Image (cartoon, helix red, strand yellow):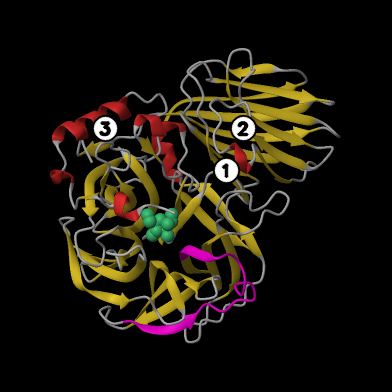
Amino acid sequence: MKDRKKEFKHLVTSLDEVPQKILEEQEQKVLASPFRQQIHIESKMGQLNDPNGFSFFNGWFHLFHQSFPLKYTQKPNYFEQGWHHYKSKNLVDWIDLGQAISNDTYFDKYGAYSGSALPINNQLFIIYSGNSWMNTETDNWRRLPTQMGAWMDKNDQVRKITTPLIKGPLDKYTGHFRDPKIFKKGNTYYVIVGAQRKNLTGTAVLFKSERLMTWDLVGEIKTQFNKNFGYMWECPDYFDFKNKGILIFCPQGLKTKFNIFQNMNQTCYCVGDELNLSNGKFNGTIVKELDQGFDFYAPQTMLTPDGRRLLIAWMSIMNGNDPTKKFGYTGCLTFPREITVIGNSIYQQPVHEIENLYSSHLQGKQEINCEKILIGKGRNARDIKLNIKIQHNGIFIFDLFSDPQNRKHLRIILNAAKNRFIVNRAQSGINFEDEFGVERSCEFNPEKTVKLRIIQDISSAEIFLENGEKVFSLRVFPDQKQNYIFVNSLNAKTVIKYEINELRIMKVEGKKNV
Ligand code: FRU
């Protein structure tokens, strides 16, 4: 059991309440990390988790994330939890606007939790979960979940709405009731909220509103699979895509089935007909994992002015055991992705704006029949595109983050004899979260030329197979010699065509500290 009294003993509502010396010490620790990312937004200190309020407003993309900047302070261990704010014109270079929502009211005193945003009448409307606790004087602490609102104006100033929009807990649900995602259809606004029923099963609940200040319960999202599918659903999202409805949600507590649901918590999606907004009926049946990598959770989507559906997620699972912890921070976001839906599948690709980061370019074609170096220099920040033709029963191996002897690496294996695509991070550097396995895999079709794309950064890889129908996102913590790429082909030769763009560091302007 968590000792909550201890956890919140040094609760502050702003970093101004923390001695400057402590903040400077934290910053110095972070700067010493060899794992700082080059093109991914990551924690500036403490913990970063879910992306929040991903939206386009006033000519800018706005992206917030859950931020616990003081999580790793010691003696005392301060507590502050809210939303950190970035904005961008091109989704790759950002302006850092610092902490935008803090835990400074009765309803969000113990954390301004996740939520979303929608531009409405020249302002950005924000809806988020306030986390509070009841019975704090006894040991019978109970969550008081409240959906709260705020408005952000064109000067990026956030003003909270003082009265709760949806008061919890609701009759049929426990205190686990959070992460509202807002969308509009016709003249009506809707939010979908993650919930736990009193029988300890997870679900999502739909509300509607005409004027935003009061919300009516429509009911649960009714599917065939949510009767008993995990004990809590976090961070639900819903959107229409060309006459289909797509539900994304993060069920906690699913059992591992061979090579799926291997992480601590999962991120799933389901494609169906459009959600029935008057009764919550959703007829999708096939539930899939959105990303099969080791580190992916709490995604959020938004619609761009040019009609693209973008997605960004927390590149982590919840354990928080990243090797960066010793440098006083954990957590980064994925690179923003564009998603499309074909049949019952979501396809993901890095947003095309990544081209703004391209620096030098390398391309070629090679026949591989033994181990060789493909790249032996440079920094580990690359957009790698491969077309791979494996001969009958061949096994193609692509090793990223390799040391010069290729003893260490993140190993990607395309085994044509077994139709298996495998990502193995056992030898990729500092091991972490090995209790959830060191390998992830899926089926692939070796008959065709296989398309593989990898966004590599200093301490992560996002691997897109077959135009992003399957994606594997993960963190790696290599040492400084691990910046080679090796290729190999066993049993038979493999022909690869490759196009590799090195990526410059993203620009982040604005605040120096949190
Ligand atoms: C998911 C989550 C959300 C919650 C937030 C708090 O990672 O647990 O359900 O709103 O993190 O930081």
Q: Earlier in the sequence, mark 1 or mark 2?
A: 1
Which residues fall within the magenta stretch? 215-236
280 on left or right of 162: right
> Does the magenta segment cover residue 220?
yes
Residue drawn at point x = 31 percent, y = 47 percent: 68
Q: Quadrant of ligand 1?
A: bottom left
Could you tell me if the residues under marks 1 and 2 are in contact, i.e. CB atoms within 8 Å?
yes
Amino acid found under the numbered disc labelled 2: Arg
Residue at the (66%, 71%) spot, across then down? 285
Give the position of the C terminus as an image quadrant.
Answer: top left
Q: Is mark 3 on a helix, strand or loop?
A: helix
Q: Which of marks 1 and 3 is in front?
A: 3
Q: Against 227, is 504 above or below?
A: above
Along the line of sight, which residue is nearer the eye, 198 or 366? 198
Number of numbered discs: 3
Quarter of the view holding residue 90: top left
* Left-right relation of 117 to 269: left
Q: Is residue 275 on the magenta stretch?
A: no
**Reading the chain from its start, which is encountered first: label 1 or label 3?**
3
